[in-house]
Image (spheres, grey):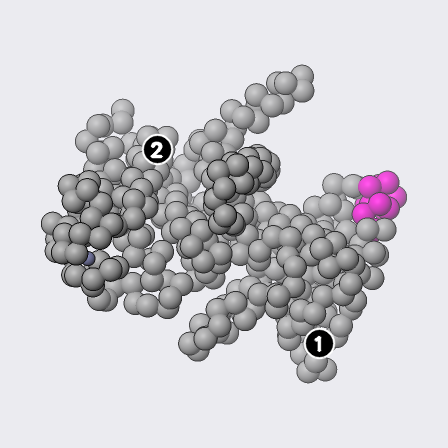
Amino acid sequence: MRSVLSLVFIGVLGALIGSFGNVVIYRLPRQESIVFPGSHCPHCGHQLSALELIPIISWLALRGRCRNCRQGISPRYPLIEALMAAGFVLIIWRWPLELYSFTALPLLVIYAMLVMMSGIDIDQQILPDSLTLPAIALALAGSLLYAPDSGLPRLNEAIFAAALGAGIIVLINRLGGLILRRFSDTKERLWPIGMDQVNIAALGGVLGGWRWGLGLALASLIANLATRRTLHISEPALYGLWFVGLIFGSTGLWLSPLTALNGTLLAAGVVAIVGAAFWWLRDLGKKIEVAESDEADEEPIAMGFGDVKLAAILGAVLGWQNLLVALLLSFIFGALGGLILRAFGGGRQVPFGPYLTLGGLVALFYGTSLLSWYLGLLGL
Ligand SMILES: [Zn+2]
């Protein structure tokens, strides 16, 4: 079924995209053009010729040194190229065009974007909106191309899981931040839409389901616009109330526990993504000097806001079951990675994004088998 030729072809294509990915990883956070000028040695500026630009092979042939100045070129360049090639081959191996028609296409694009995001996150500790937000839209639209038997979500399932992913991480962000601040209020205030609306959506969702969450967030947005200022609700008080709502919700008194939990996660997740998209589109025209202007200003955060958008991408690709597998795996990978880095004295902090991506990729290929294995263990 799967022709060796098509796998070789896709591997070479992956390596080439990986080579382009290296350029994006380096230049995108520095707001440099990703097409011009051509690739050059980071030490002496020597312009690379076509022969020096062959993915992986050029680096090996030159033994990892610049041909001009003989200075070392980081092994991460061929590594990213090999990673991209391997991922492309795996995706086409799992979803060959002959069997699943265009299922693999959106997956290839999103995989390439995920590798670039991880590289940037490791380098700069940011996940740029110009990659994450388009990737969410692409992952949602891509679900329309999936073959019915591909094991991938339909559009409505993709939207649900994207909101769920964003909601889980944004609530970890809000509650974790609250604990790290020792339950004092946050300083973040954005007009007209910001964390206030996320918090209100979370509260409305836990009290009345996701429609209430979205409705109350919309009402507070309109109130902000009408009064031209940010109507401030103290975060400790709001999450105090939220906690009470969660306890009552879990008793099933007026909502089923699942409706309350889904309500708070979905509403908060949707508002977080809509808010992020608003600020990205608003700032798109201008050249912003400080990229992190929309991040919490020096406040302790449990998990970066970029991870919220990343979780939405993974949700849209994986569907909710595999998303939960991915999140669980990423926490395990993150803990193991942290231990290993500490043991080997690697002083550098690795952000959570790459662990989340790794968890997502494992879940993409093995989520269903892992889930049935785990449920088997539980005797379900
Ligand atoms: Zn050089």
Per the image, label 2 sits on a secondary structure element best described as helix
Whether label 1 lies within 8 Å of ligand 1 gets the answer no
Q: Is residue 254 magenta?
A: yes
Per the image, label 1 sits on a secondary structure element best described as loop
- 80 left or right, relative to 363: left
- 343 left or right, relative to 244: left
* Residue 275 location, quadrant: bottom right
Residue 110 visible in image: no
Q: Could you tell me how far apart the alpha carbons at marks 1 and 2 are, in whole angstroms?
A: 48 Å
* Screen quadrant of the C terminus: top right
Looking at this view, is 313 or 19 the one in front?
Answer: 19
Q: Main secondary structure of the magenta part?
A: helix
Residue receiving disc 2 = 90
Which residue corresponds to the image point at 64% horizontal and 48% vertical from the top-left?
168
Which residue corresponds to the image point at 43% horizontal and 62% vertical from the top-left?
130
Which residue corresponds to the image point at 72% horizontal and 82% vertical from the top-left?
227
* Residue 85 location, quadrant: top left
Q: Residues within 10 Å of mark 2 (few under 14, many from 20)?
A: some
* Residue 189 location, quadrant: bottom right
In the image, farthest residue toward the front: 345
Q: Give, as a single range, the part of the protein colored magenta.
A: 245-255
